[in-house]
Image (spheres, rainbow, N blue to C red):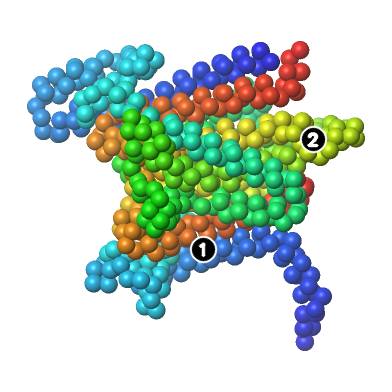
Amino acid sequence: MSVFLAKRFLTFVATLLGASIVVFLVLEILPGDPSMTLLGADADEEAYAALRLKLGLDEPAVLRYFDWMWGMMQGDFGISYAYSVPVMELVWGAMALTVPLAIFAMLITIVVALGLGVFAASRHNKPGDYVVMAFSQLGIAVPNFWFGILLILFFAVNLGWFKAGGFVQWEDGVWLAVKSLFLPAIALATVQAAILARTTRSAVLETFREDYVRTARAKGLTRSQTLWRHVLRNALIPVITVMGLQFANLLAGTIVIESVFSLPGLGKLVFQGIANRDMPVVKDIVLLLAGMVIVVNFVVDVTYAVIDPRLKVHDV
Amino acid sequence: MSEPVSKNQLMAALTLMTRYRNFVIGAVLTGLVIVCAFLSAVWTPHSAVELAIRSRLQLPSLEHWLGTDHLGRDILSMIMVGAQNSLIVGIVAVSIGVFLGVGLGLWAAAKRGWTEELIMRFSDFTFAFPAVLSAIMITAILGPGAVNSILAIGIYNIPVFARISRGAANAIWSREYIMAAKAAGKGRFRITVEHVLPNITSVIVVQATISFAIAILAEAALSYLGIGTQPPEPSWGRMLNDAQTYATIKPYLAIFPGAAIFLAVLGLNMLGDGLRDILDPRLTRGR
């Protein structure tokens, strides 16, 4: 397993580096001279030169890339053009919303999807199974931002149980903050849970057909004992893989959902950055989001190397 | 004189339709979207772009079946024209994915070794940039627009098709008839074109249908965010964005465009499932 892990770690680092290079090329090199966009087309030459010097744009691109990377690793994300504050401050505030929201949505997804998936598999080809599968077919097709709007209309406007949008800061009460993330998390989790419930169901059904499950049944375990002792653990491998792949979509969904519920998270920050031509903010957030996806996929790979006993056998 | 359809034939047709109900429902819904798109090119009940402030925010009526929006435009007409937009984005974005992705996947399977490794690592890497993220980058340098969303979704599709076609192609390469073709002196390229590609077509067709659904969803999301299709071009996502402003007073505004996206995506997903049932019966066993 250690060979697998070492190999996987190397590709992880390479992927992160590749992502940072692409982000740098696209957002730093392609747009040209930012001093033009910041000062407008008719400032005098000295002003441009002064600004370029101040922003460190006179240095060669390679050096600027390493500066940027070195800074990122130390938590120095550069200075925002638009607000003249460290990008880190802006990002940190936005992360306090985006990350809990993504985790909240993921938790709901896991609980609902595993529950429904195992339930459907245990009622295979019976009405319960059909109902769950029909709902998941519908759930996969629902655009999450539309679902978010419908949730607002029903639970906030009609019933008045929640606020229609906005975020209550953590300092003003953990419960209130969680409450303001509740509808967004539901909107995000519905589609994800619909997909994951299908994966869980077919993984459990698939595992039930394995020889070792037949052996377990033959030695006298009941169906539910086999389910808990043997099937679930093995069925989790494809489920975790799909969860990892879904994480990128979840994060992308978070950006969209933040816009629906007017939440001041990374999504809002990056769109403001685009509107203000604030490249350092855009660059850092894009890399941060891509980085999160890469890290999660790495963790997923490592996790199933640990869960799947068959992977251990390979390198003895 | 042709024989009237017998009761048995009718029953047989019905049985077939029930067995492939995914395919039937999916084909009907998808067909509806396509018909709307083509019809709207020549006819819509009202203009989809012309403003009629005097008849703004009207409830559904005989005159305006789905009501009018905040600028007095007919919602039904806008949804019909929006179908064109969704179809075009879907077709181009999926084509980018199919041509480049399948090409890379087949190449990887044919060459193996470090070429395969490199292509697959490239795929892994592209996976870290979901369509929204690529769209953000493209918008940051080029500004918003429909072409950007097509590009972003297309780029996202490349690794999807590269992975799936490489996996399917590898399975074909280990078959005996490939050995026979090699023994007959055929080169890798010829074997790929003559034997591998025809045998993985069904997998690609099924994936293309599902990717089409995902593309429609992604385009709607990007237009909703304001970085996709720009006004006055009607698009379903954009309509939802406009609708949200007025949703508290006119909730129906938010219902119809969302329902259009939902039905189109549902139709394509079911069509994909249905095609899989028909083209690859082995896979349905586990479902």
Tell me the distance, in whole angstroms, between the alpha carbons under discs 1 and 2: 50 Å
The residue labelled by disc 2 is: A225
Name the side, left or right, on which B175 lies relative to A301. right
Q: Which mark is residue A72?
A: none
The residue labelled by disc 1 is: B34
Please identify the quarter of the rendering in which residue B236 is found. Answer: bottom left
Mark 1, chain letter?
B
Instruction: Write the residue at 57% across / 54% down.
Output: A138
Residue situated in front as seen by the camera: A249 or A283: A249
Disc 1 marks a residue whose amino acid type is: Ile
Q: Estimate the x, y position of residue B176 in percent, counting from the top left.
A: 82, 36
Name the side, left or right, on which A137 lies relative to B153. right
Name the side, left or right, on which B279 lies relative to A252. right
Q: Estimate the x, y position of residue A260 in percent, counting from the top left.
A: 37, 47
Q: Can residue A239 be seen in the rendering of this structure?
A: yes
Instruction: Write the residue at 72% across / 64% down.
Output: B18
Name the element at disc 2: helix
Mark 2, chain letter?
A
Residue situated in front as seen by the camera: B137 or B259: B259
Q: Can residue B115 be seen in the rendering of this structure?
A: no
For residue A226, above or below residue A52: below
Callout 2 crowding tier (Cα within 10 Å): few <14, some 14–19, many ≥20: few
Q: Estimate the x, y position of residue A140 in percent, counting from the top left.
A: 56, 49
Instruction: Write the residue at 70% across / 53% down.
Output: A128
